[in-house]
């Protein structure tokens, strides 16, 4: 493996967010590829369609809050009757 490829793989493991400009026909394959690197597509102002390309914003999956995730120390629980 080349040194440049090793650096790029290390960078992908450390990235928090990323915007990619991809051809309109390649958007889904880019989303699928980035999913393999632990990044999830985020629909935001940064995701825009250009003439022949789409800018897609990705964020680390572990930075998304899930409704299924419990709050620390049950802080969100309401015990009122």
Image (spheres, rainbow, N blue to C red):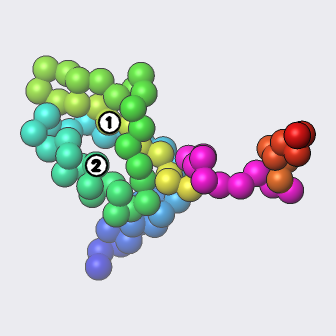
Residue 71 is covered by the magenta coloring: yes
| Relative to 1, residue 36 above or below | above
How far from the left and from the top, in percent, is residue 7? 41, 65
Q: Which of 71 and 81 is in front in this view?
A: 81
Q: Nearer the viewer, residue 73 or 14?
A: 73
Residue drawn at x 47%, y 45% as measured from the top left? 59
Of mark 2 and mark 1, the one earlier in the sequence is 2
- In magenta, the rendered stretch is 63-73
Which secondary structure lies at badge 1?
strand
Dividing the image into 4 quarters, which one contains the N terminus? bottom left
Which secondary structure lies at badge 2?
helix
C-alpha distance separating marks 2 and 1? 8 Å
Q: What is the number of the mark on residue 31?
A: 2
How far from the left and from the top, in percent, is residue 62? 56, 56
Question: How many numbered discs, if any?
Answer: 2
Q: Is residue 19 left or right of residue 14?
A: left
Residue 54 is covered by the magenta coloring: no
| Relative to 17, residue 45 above or below | above
Q: Mark 1 points at which residue?
A: 56
Please tell me in which quadrant of the rendered image residue 69 appears. Answer: bottom right
Q: Is residue 13 left or right of residue 5?
A: right
């Amino acid at each position: 493996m080349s040194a440049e490829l090793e650096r790029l793989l290390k960078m992908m493991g450390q990235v928090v967010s990323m915007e990619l400009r991809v051809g309109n026909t390649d958007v889904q394959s880019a989303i699928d590829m980035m999913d393999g690197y632990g990044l999830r597509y985020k629909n935001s102002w940064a995701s825009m369609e250009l003439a022949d390309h789409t800018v897609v914003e990705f964020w680390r999956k572990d930075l998304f809050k899930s409704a299924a995730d419990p709050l620390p120390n049950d802080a969100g629980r309401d015990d009122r009757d």
